[in-house]
Amino acid sequence: MSQDHSKVAYQVMWNRLISVVEEQAQALVRTAFSTSVREAGDLSAGVYDTHGNMLAQAVTGTPGHVNAMADAVAHFIRRIGRQNMFEGDVYITNDPWEGTGHLHDITMVTPSFHNGTLVGFFACTAHIVDIGGRGFGADAQSVYEEGLYIPIMKFADRGEVDETLVRIIRGNVREPDQLIGDIYALATCNEIGHRRLIGMMEEFDLDHLDGIAEFILENSRRATIEAIAALPQTSATGEMTMDGFDVPITLKVKVSVEGDRIVTDFTGTSGLDKKGINCPLVYTKAYACYALKVAIAPEIPNNAASLAPFEITAPENSIVNALHPAPVALRHIVGHFVPDAVYDAFDKIVPGLVPAEGAGCLCNFQVSLRPRSDAPAPADARRSEVLTFNSGGSGARPEHDGMNATAFPSGVMTMPIEATEHAGPVIIWRKELRSDSGGAGKTRGGLGQYMEVGAQEGHEFDIQAMFDRSQHPARGRRGGQNGAPTTIAQDDGTAMRVKGKQFVPHGRKVVMAFPGGAGYGNPSERPSELVKRDLARGYISEETARTDYGLSAEDIASVQKAVARGDQI
């Protein structure tokens, strides 16, 4: 059959491939057991050529997953061996260094055959609620403590599921039904992608994907290089400090624009931490590439060729290039700060383009609930693991305010209270935007949020805190002010740490305030109409309107009257 197609036909096929992987991702959202997948979109999906090059990714998903997964299929090909790949196979791993950075992400790869010939691969990743070990948190001192390790292997061989592997997994995790359900959901979404791909190939009379793969990769490479070539050919350095676990961590970075590539070097960054916040290079690379790509070439679809010109280097066993067996469970905390560090340098190369710092890492916590131990528990009290994803505010952009309670750079959605409370005997007593948390500026930082969490009657719990920005809030850019810091304590005033597993007795609540994004530009340049609007909406207080933005007493009084009348401002 002919494989000659016009550029128009190839463009149609390219768009079709993107829709195929988006349908693949949506199938995972619909069938997954974990609330982190169904409600927060903590997943990725993609299609690859026979060499393991990512051709298209789903829009639904996180940069950390999909950009790390971009390198994963080549590892599967190498480990499994092409000669051992057959129709009906499904492969699995949660290897932090050959997958997406920690044991709590399962990546599954399915070879796609057409008329008996291997034509490509589908891959997907999802965060799972438990993988055994110490549980999802930073307390481990090596990866061996963090849970069950699944090397790259076959989950299904020619359609036959490895039941021994299933029994091993079930015997090592706290939520076996949920986890095995997620694994089958991952396998199913790959199968849906495969079916849609074969339908496309039959429609366009294709025997293989070589032609469309070459078209996608060459056009993406050329467009990305053109975007890089248009930048000032220079270099700049940046750095930022975060809380860390027991000691602060500093990320140092040098960004160099060099013709057809951008080199990002993390030399000088802090070394490994004793706790599980270390970040494998694959995850650091994912977010460093993402930061630069969205800054200079956001319109170019994400694939192997559009990522290739972004080269990332870091010293071995720095906290952004953790080697085995370093603990890496909360690698996202460091990884999510990589874009802010990169932007601190890039802002000096191309001023007026990148946002101010935001909350950075997700404001996640996991609650391990159990019947109370200080007194007899009700007969219906039970054990449960509940993971909830939440966000602080994003940083202000040069021309727009930061987004409230919105995760940048991860893009993961905040979980609804209803979904969280459905997952186990947990109660979310409060969840609302945090006034005055966004840094003042010509454009204002996004607001963080308040949360209060407790357990149903008869339960006590451990909370795994996964926060940062308590001592190092988001920094303003070009005259903007800092965002508000993170706080956490029990409702009786008992102090708590921003990271680590901590016991909460029966009847107590945990009170949290998540950080705000920083402001951009001098607050005095913010239009008074926007200050009034923020005051009317409760985003800022009267004190902030007066002291940070210079709003007059008369204007404040007029806003109060308008709000009392129910007028729109």
Image (spheres, rainbow, N blue to C red):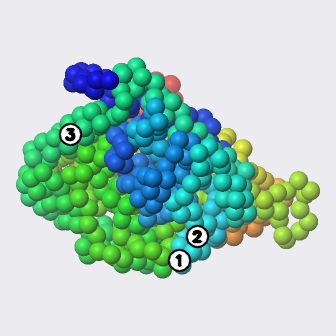
- The residue that appears at 44% across and 70% down in the rendered structure is 278
Helix, strand or loop at label 1? It is loop
Which one is nearer the viewer's eye here, 410 or 33?
A: 33
> Where is residue 154 drawn, in percent x and y?
56, 54
Residue contact between numbered discs 1 and 2, judged by CB atoms under 8 Å: yes
Helix, strand or loop at label 2? It is loop
Measure the C-alpha gap from mark 2 to mark 3. Answer: 41 Å
In the picture, the quarter occupied by the N terminus is top left
Q: Is residue 264 visible?
A: yes
Q: Is residue 174 visible?
A: no
Q: Which mark is residue 457?
A: none
Which one is nearer the viewer's eye here, 262 or 149?
A: 149
Q: Which residue is mark 1?
A: 142
Q: Which mark is residue 218?
A: 3
> Where is residue 15 drawn, in percent x and y?
34, 27
Does 375 appear above or below 184? below
- The residue that appears at 53% across and 77% down in the rendered structure is 142
Helix, strand or loop at label 3? It is helix
| Residue 264 lies in quadrant | bottom left
Residue type at tag 1: Ser
Q: Which residue is mark 2?
A: 146
Q: Earlier in the sequence, mark 1 or mark 3?
A: 1
Does 445 appear above or below 339? above
Does 403 appear above or below 512? above
> Where is residue 551 drawn, in percent x and y?
32, 42
- The residue that appears at 8% across and 58% down in the rendered structure is 234
> Where is residue 297 drawn, in percent x and y?
22, 41
- The residue that appears at 37% across and 44% down in the rendered structure is 50
Measure the C-alpha gap from mark 1 to mark 3. Answer: 42 Å
